[in-house]
Image: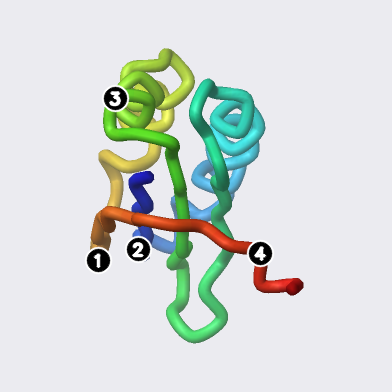
Amino acid sequence: MIAVAGLLQFKPEDRQSVLDGLKEVVRRSRQDPGCIDYWWSEDIETADAFRFFECWESQELMDAHMAQPHTEAFMSQCVSRVTNVDAYSYQVSDRQSAAG
């Protein structure tokens, strides 16, 4: 499994258009083959910043997600306006329920 997590920060005037873009890319990405988890949330400590987490069954399926039209549209419309980024990818060897 591949996990990607991080933070993207935008200009204050871009906040609403980023939120609009996020609604679409989250909805569609969660339907992509191999998606285990995919979410974004607004950071409560950093103004105009959004945290994200993605988990994919494999690198190949994550790469296919990145090539999807909805992902490419989000990247060109929103990510191109990022003012600060802090993101990392992780190789995950196992997944277990924390509920017991």
Rendering coords of residue 72 (x, y %) = 35, 22
Q: In front: 32, or 72?
A: 32
- Residue that carries the numbered disc 1 in the rendered image: 86
- Compared with residue 55, is residue 25 higher up or lower down, i.e. above or below? above
Question: How far apart are labels 3 and 1 at the CA level?
Answer: 23 Å
Secondary structure, mark 3, is: helix
The circle on residue 6 is: 2
Amino acid type, mark 2? Gly
- Which comes before the other along the chain, label 2 or label 1? 2
- Residue that carries the numbered disc 4 in the rendered image: 97
Question: How far apart are labels 2 and 4 at the CA level?
Answer: 23 Å
Image-based side of 81 in relation to 29, left or right:
left
Secondary structure, mark 4, is: loop
- Which comes before the other along the chain, label 2 or label 4? 2
Say which of marks 2 and 3 sits in front: 3
Classify the position of the C terminus by image quarter: bottom right
The circle on residue 60 is: 3
Question: How far apart are labels 2 and 3 at the CA level?
Answer: 20 Å
Say which of marks 3 and 1 sits in front: 3
- Which comes before the other along the chain, label 2 or label 3? 2
